[in-house]
Image (cartoon, rainbow, N blue to C red):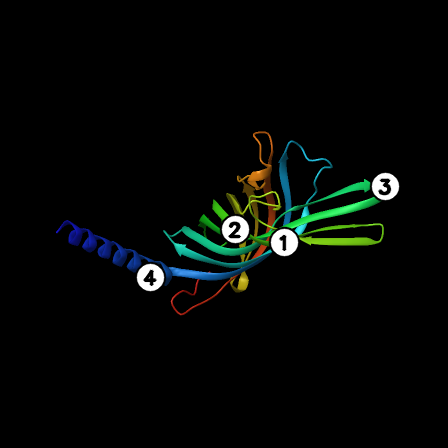
């Protein structure tokens, strides 16, 4: 009897979650997001030579789920470029090197908005999927694929997580222009290279354009 009762409770719970998910999807207003990232890292101890911002990009989809008149929950699924660049001298040659990992990133922001502006914040988690490192100088160029894991053969740990900050304005025609900042909390060094005194954390300044898709049930952006 106890097993049967537990099974019934589990079925009821799954039914409730399914109904809640369908309700949220029905209330969601979806959008396409693309933007320009300026990526860097914060390294401990300080990196030598100093790292500089690396231009890269982000691309994906978001959803606005209305919580109240001025508040929405905004999850998303983004391909987001991160990394850094640095310059140094080697045997009299000026070398520019870059490291550009890409992550499948899921942000979940709590947004406050009206008809003109929006702002908010929330956590994100990202999974490293591909990337490359390049070095150019003396008329030569070399490139290598990046790998994600925790061994001595890997370049980055597999996961990144942190905090998103975002604000912007709503434009005519369902467009939004925003700026954001990704503050990484995760030490993205592979575990093999970590120590109590060593860490690398992503920092990303974002400029993005969003186009909110219209549907019959939701014509406001």
Using the numbered discs, state the Cα–Cα distance from disc 4 to disc 1 in whole angstroms. Answer: 36 Å
Q: Residues within 10 Å of mark 4 (few under 14, many from 20)?
A: few
Q: How would you rate the neighbour count of disc 3 (Cα within 10 Å): few for under 14, some for 14-19, many for 20 or more? A: few
Q: Secondary structure at mark 4?
A: helix
Q: Position of residue 60 (x, y in %)?
A: 53, 59
Image quadrant of residue 131?
bottom right
Of the two numbered discs 4 and 1 in the rendering, the one whose residue sits closer to the viewer? 1
Q: Residue furthest bottom?
A: 216
Q: Residue at x 38, y 52 (%)?
A: 69
Res 8 quadrant in image: bottom left
- Tell me residue 63's x, y (percent): 45, 58
Mark 1 and mark 3: Cα distance apart in space? 28 Å
Q: Which residue is mark 3?
A: 91
On the image, numbered disc 1 is attached to which residue? Answer: 131
Residue located at (27% from left, 56% from top): 14
- Can residue 88 be seen from the camera position used here? yes
How far from the left and from the top, in percent, is residue 143? 72, 54
Nearer the observer: mark 2 or 3; the answer is 3
- 161 relative position to 49: left or right: left
Circle 2 residue:
127
Q: Which residue is mark 4?
A: 22
Query: SS of the residue at dot 3?
Result: loop
Element at label 2: strand
Q: Residues within 10 Å of mark 1 (few under 14, many from 20)?
A: some
């Amino acid at each position: 009897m106890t097993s049967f009762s537990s099974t019934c409770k589990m079925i009821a719970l799954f039914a409730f979650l399914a109904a809640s998910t369908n309700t949220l999807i029905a209330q969601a207003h979806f959008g396409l997001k693309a933007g320009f990232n300026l990526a860097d890292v914060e390294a401990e101890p300080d990196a030598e030579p100093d790292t500089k911002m690396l231009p890269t990009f982000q691309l994906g989809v978001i959803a606005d789920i209305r919580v109240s008149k001025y508040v929405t929950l905004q999850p998303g699924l983004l391909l987001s470029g991160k990394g850094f660049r640095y310059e140094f001298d080697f045997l009299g040659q000026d070398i520019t090197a870059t490291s550009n990992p890409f992550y499948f990133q899921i942000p979940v922001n709590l947004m406050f908005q009206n008809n003109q502006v929006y702002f908010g914040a929330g956590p994100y988690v990202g999974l490293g999927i591909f990337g490359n490192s390049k070095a150019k100088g003396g008329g030569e160029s070399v490139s290598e694929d990046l790998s994600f894991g925790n061994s001595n053969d890997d370049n980055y740990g597999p996961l990144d997580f942190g905090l998103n900050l975002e604000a912007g304005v709503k434009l005519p025609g369902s467009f939004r222009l925003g700026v954001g900042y990704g503050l990484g909390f995760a030490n993205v060094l592979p575990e093999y290279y970590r120590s109590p005194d060593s860490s690398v954390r992503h920092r990303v300044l974002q400029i993005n354009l969003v186009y909110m898709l219209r549907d019959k049930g939701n014509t406001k952006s």
